[in-house]
Amino acid sequence: MDRVAIIGASMTQFGQRDAWIRELLAEAGQAALADADVSPDEIEHLYVSNMASGEFEGQTGVPNALAHDLAAMPAYTARIDQTSSSGGAGVYAAWQSVASGASDMTMLVGGEKMTHRSTAEATDVIASLTHPVEYKHGVTLPSFAGLTARLYLDTYDAPRESLGKVAVKNHKNGVDNPHAQFRKEVDLDTVLDSPVVADPLRLYDFCPITDGSAALVFCPESVAREYTDDYAVISGIGGATDTHVVHERADPTTMGGVVNSSEIAYEMADLEPDDVDVAELHDMFTILEFLQSEDLGFFEKGEGWKAVDEGVTDRDGDLPINTSGGLKSKGHPLGASGVAQVYEIYKQLIGDAGKRQVDADVGLACNVGGFGNCVTTTIMESR
């Protein structure tokens, strides 16, 4: 099977945008086509990663509209919705379309428009992915995060400051990302003194509500060589789920979907965790960076906080994590986040990450839906 390559990518400005979902998607799509030097009529499959355009702004049929807006007809279109891991699921769908031989040129555009709704309204839309029994009792993802963070700190004797250091690190990385929502460093005292949201987590432990979009262009590696010398390949990809009801898990600090999806991806790529040079993890809450880094096999269970504390995951550390600023600083437009993670890895692997650039030949992106309910792990390599 010919390897699947990414030959073009784009990411819009994340943050509060005046544009609506169709405009955001078109902005990213046009930029990715230009980056790949591909004309719209070459696109055979067009996927849109989006969680809730209907709920947020009453807009449905966005893939069809995007094909029209980009002049990409008669491309096959489909919307990929897998809650907050819609972007990663879209990467999987786009990879499958090319790997199967069904398409020689596929584009994925992920996006979400959220900031026009209040924090309570946006939180309610996102909380609808929880189990109905949990939802009717007022359970939200922030409450899951707080409970899990407390369990982790108590179980592994981790100091509260260790979570704050994740926020400090990712905000520092975000300063050098021109597309990030927050491009300002924060110090540890600011993080630890911010308002409590779900004890022990505070305001700076959470990512923001965000508008934005990102896009990727996929094709077989043999086709990629006809367009550019600067491309990256997806060498491994895996998707998995975990229990829908979080309290049914034997250990809430282990995300089974991360473990299982990464095992599939590592086996496909014939690589090990130690081979990964840079990673983008789904830090919707700071505690998730610990959990994912351990469940991906980067660190032993209960040791992820020590890696952050020792600077291992800094941009100049042995394993840079979230060089983009992560969801924490970059922002989290639900359907775009997983696409933007792969955008960052792609940029790192082709040596086009600017001030964020690290020395990397192998990169990994892990996109999480809900509280680990569904996960896609993608491993990429430079050509």
Image (cartoon, helix red, strand yellow):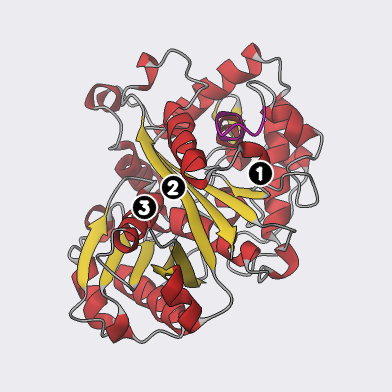
Disc on the earlier residue, 3 or 1: 3
Question: Is 285 situated left or right of 114 in this image?
Answer: right
Q: Is 296 colored magenta in this rendering?
A: yes
Q: Which mark is residue 237?
A: 2
x then y, percent, for residue 223: 42, 76
Label 3: which residue? Answer: 92
Residue at position x 40%, y 84% in the image: 38
Nearest the eye: 183 or 101:
101
Give, as a three-letter code, the residue at label 2: Ile
Is label 3 or label 1 in front? 1
The residue under label 3 is which amino acid type? Tyr
Q: Determine which of the numbered discs, if any, sits on residue 87 in the image.
A: none
Give the camera-side residue of 230 and 52.
230
Residue 367 in view: yes
Question: Where does residue 372 sit, x and y in percent of width and height?
Answer: 42, 32
Residue 359 lies within the magenta run: no
Bin the neighbour count of mark 3 within 10 Å (Cα to Cα): few under 14, some 14-19, many 20 and up: many
Under circle 1, the secondary element is helix
Residue 275 shows which numbered tag?
Answer: 1
> Which contiguous range is marked in magenta?
292-299
